[in-house]
Image (cartoon, grey):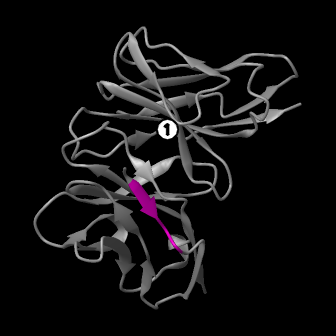
């Protein structure tokens, strides 16, 4: 079975501070991992993905994510948060080889950046 | 620009009424998906289609129906059998390649009158 857990419903961080949004996953094989961002009344926008290779992947708007196979985690990070980063963030996973081609999403983490 | 267009942005349903949500994509993607989003529950898969004239039920298909007569279009009908239809509905599309992300439309918000 494939699943994603985002253990924090809400993350608050001060503007200019580093931010982390946590994600852990479960797949039977090798994972393909994705982060998305959602602004109010909008669809999900793709930020970055891990497929293979370097454990640190860089994406849009200065975001990056670190893949940790032993901890089955894929935490989203940014060195310096902006107020405009305030949004809902979703982690998603699919198995790289088996099962349906669907993405499995976490329940989302609401990030608030405080000015 | 290529993308996914969902319409209408807001929709109201009366008791006993079926309503249809439109989803059109010009990305030439084979696969299309419908999700329902409720606060605190993330995205739940309603139906998906990997190819024209074929579709499969997702986790919460009861009270919904779809068709896939054209590659570009994947309309969702919310039937009167869906007793709690108030939600934000998102359509997505993707290539068959597992390493590629899904692309999303901007959603339709459905409410009950």
Q: Which residue is drawn at 38% across and 14% down?
A: B54
| Residue at which label 1 appears | B105
Q: Does the magenta stretch include residue B5?
A: no
Q: Is residue A69 placed above or below B58 in the rendered structure?
A: below
Image quadrant where one finds the C terminus of chain A: bottom right
Q: Is residue B107 placed above or below B38 in the rendered structure?
A: above
Residue B53 x/y as whole percent: 38, 9
Q: Residue furthest left?
A: A53
Look at the numbered disc 1 and give the secondary structure of its residue: loop
The picture quadrant where one finds residue A50 is: bottom left
Residue A56 x/y as whole percent: 20, 74
What's the chain of the residue with tag 1?
A: B
Q: Nearer the viewer, residue B30 or B61?
A: B61
Q: Which of A79 and A94 is in front in this view?
A: A94
Q: Residue at x 48, y 50 (%)?
A: A44
Q: Is there any visible trace of residue A91 in the rendered image?
A: no
> Left of A26 or right of it: where is B48?
right
> Left of A71 or right of it: where is B12?
right
Q: Nearer the viewer, residue A28 or A35?
A: A28
Q: Which residue is drawn at 34% across and 54% down?
A: A93
The picture quadrant where one finds residue A52 is: bottom left
Q: Residue at x 88, y 22 (%)?
A: B15
Magenta residues (range): A3-7
Q: Is there any visible trace of residue B15 in the rendered image?
A: yes
Q: Residues within 10 Å of mark 1 (few under 14, many from 20)?
A: many
The picture quadrant where one finds residue B25 is: top left
Q: Is residue B97 placed above or below A105 in the rendered structure?
A: above
Q: Is the magenta stretch mostly helix, strand or loop?
A: strand
Q: Which of B56 and B71 is in front in this view?
A: B56
């Amino acid at each position: 079975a494939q699943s994603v857990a985002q253990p924090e419903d809400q993350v608050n961080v001060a503007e200019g501070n580093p931010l982390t949004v946590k994600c852990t996953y479960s797949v039977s094989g090798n994972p393909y991992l994705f982060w998305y961002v959602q602004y109010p009344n909008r669809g999900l926008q793709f930020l970055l993905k891990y497929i293979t290779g370097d454990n640190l992947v860089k994406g849009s708007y200065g975001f990056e994510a670190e893949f940790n196979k032993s901890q089955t985690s894929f935490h989203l990070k940014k060195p310096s948060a902006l107020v405009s980063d305030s949004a809902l963030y979703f982690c998603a996973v699919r198995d790289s080889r088996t099962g349906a081609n669907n993405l499995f999403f976490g329940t989302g983490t609401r990030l608030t950046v405080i000015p | 620009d290529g993308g996914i267009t969902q319409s209408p942005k807001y929709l109201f349903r009366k008791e006993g009424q079926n309503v249809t949500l439109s989803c059109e994509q010009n990305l030439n993607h084979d696969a299309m998906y419908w999700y329902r989003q409720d606060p605190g529950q993330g995205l739940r898969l309603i139906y998906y289609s990997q190819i024209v004239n074929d579709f499969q039920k997702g986790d919460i298909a009861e009270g919904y129906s779809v068709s896939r007569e054209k590659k570009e279009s994947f309309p969702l009908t919310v039937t009167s059998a869906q007793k709690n239809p108030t939600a934000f509905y998102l359509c997505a599309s993707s290539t068959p390649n597992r390493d590629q992300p899904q692309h999303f439309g901007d959603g339709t918000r459905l409410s009950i009158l």
